[in-house]
Image (cartoon, helix red, strand yellow):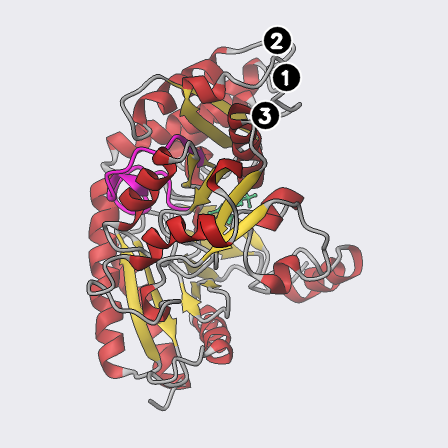
Amino acid sequence: MKTNKSLMAERIKHIPQGPFNVHPIFVAKAKEAIITDIEGKEYIDFAGGIGVNNVGHCNDEVLKAVQDQIQKYIHTCFHVVMYEPYVELAKRLNEITPGNFPKKTMFVNSGAEAVENAIKIARHATGRPATIAFEDAFHGRTLLALSLTSKMKPYKFGFAPYAPEIYRMPYAYCYRCAFGLEYPSCEIHCAYFLREFFHTHISSEQVAALIVEPIQGEGGFIAPPKEYFKILKKICEDNGIVFIADEIQTGYGRTAKMFAMEHYEVEPDIVIMAKSIAAGLPLGAVTGKTDLMDHPQVGGLGGTYGGNPVACRAALAVLEQFTKQNLLSRAEKIGKKVLEEFKEIQAHFSVVGDVRGLGAMVGMELVVDRKTKEPATALTKQLVSRCREKGLLMISAGTHSNIIRPLMPLVITDEQLDRGLSIIEESLGELSTH
Ligand SMILES: Cc1ncc(COP(=O)(O)O)c(C=O)c1O
């Protein structure tokens, strides 16, 4: 019988080290918020396939939709013979994304591909070359998406040259403010700084798009102050710059609203989605104002698999699940519990420097010392491993990999949630002396 260890040996032999693995285990089956490995050990899943399994692993209704679809047809390529699920899903996304204006949607296979297409569309529509992105941003690993991503190691190191015409601003990372200011006395200087940026980095007339995560995911669950995005959006509007919200990790309810930008009352010109929208089938979406989306010529956008019918059917089932199971209010409840628990942990352990987030997107930043804020990278890694030993799967985030970022399925039970949070506290108690 194969074990985690024996399969790991084969994995090392046949697969390069580049595609990383957080946990040295192999799955046998997964249902809702529980993953069972090939040795029969059960884990509570606080990673959700990196924010993908919001409706739970193998959701029954998603399975039914997928099974029904694969009986009919699996692939024709939307560019060759069209199919209804693509059209139906586009229609739904045009309705539910923020903004009461005419919209259109196209589909791709992944988050990175959604990023690439959003930038292509913005460039085409504006006739301008440049994009503004942010420090600590993560937008994916294909060359343009990688160039927009901030973290050097392991993501960018050794892969230069990067795509040109990308300019990077500090983000609203209040715990580590790039300007040394404090909210609210800062008066959101980091957002108004964009105006100065046009003088010091790139002239506004050259900028096609500003791409931003409403809450940075891989960057460490960094949620900007409520005024931040309105200011950025207004400056973009004043300067003819396309405002792209990367909702790939925040999207579909993670923050207790379908889209995190709703918290900020901002209507992006383009919203990009992937991850949770199809419950694990590969699907990305670009939804934007009709005049922007229709700008590229016929054949200028697309791909062989983009908007695969099985993935579209899964995505339609996911949307139904959000309504039927009231997952937004569930996300709010989960978030409240996680926030309370993390604050409690912070009160007991000085290694917890910051607790922050919105809805069920709550992170905990670990530091060696609260004064110097030196990132506790090694401790975070140990914590993730110790939690696994105790039956909880977790992942970290942050430029210094020192932030705990729970992305549990929103269908997790109260009991599983409580147990998972206790494991984090117990493990931290075993690993940390302060
Ligand atoms: C905010 C954000 N954008 C883009 C991506 C890239 O998505 P994918 O891994 O599907 O290419 C990710 C993935 O983690 C993400 O979190």
316, above or below 35, in the image:
above
In the image: residue 371, left or right of residue 399: left
In the image: residue 234, left or right of residue 104: left
Task: For marks 3 and 2, give the CA distance.
Answer: 13 Å
Q: Are marks 3 and 2 in contact (CB under 8 Å)?
A: no
Which residue has dot 1 on it? 77
Residue at the spot x=43%, y=27% of the render?
287
| Amino acid type, residue under disc 1 in the picture | Cys
> Is the CB of mark 2 within 8 Å of ligand 1?
no
When asked about the image quadrant of residue 2, the answer is bottom right
Q: Are marks 1 and 2 in contact (CB under 8 Å)?
A: yes
As helix, strand or loop, the secondary structure at mark 2 comes to loop
Mark positioned earlier in the residue sequence (3 or 2): 2
> Is the CB of mark 3 within 8 Å of ligand 1?
no
| Amino acid type, residue under disc 3 in the picture | Gly
Which residue has dot 3 on it? 306
Total marks drawn?
3
Residue at the spot x=35%, y=72% of the render?
424
Q: Residue 430: x percent and y percent?
A: 38, 85
Which residue has dot 2 on it? 81
| Amino acid type, residue under disc 2 in the picture | Val
Task: For marks 1 and 3, give the CA distance.
Answer: 8 Å
* Disc 1 packing (10 Å; few <14; some 14–19; many ≥20): some
As helix, strand or loop, the secondary structure at mark 1 comes to loop
Viewer-proximal residue among 212 and 403: 212
* Disc 3 packing (10 Å; few <14; some 14–19; many ≥20): many
Q: Does the magenta portion include 251?
A: yes
Viewer-proximal residue among 134 and 424: 134
Q: Does the magenta portion include 399?
A: no
Residue at the spot x=59%, y=25% of the render?
306
* Magenta-colored span: 249-272
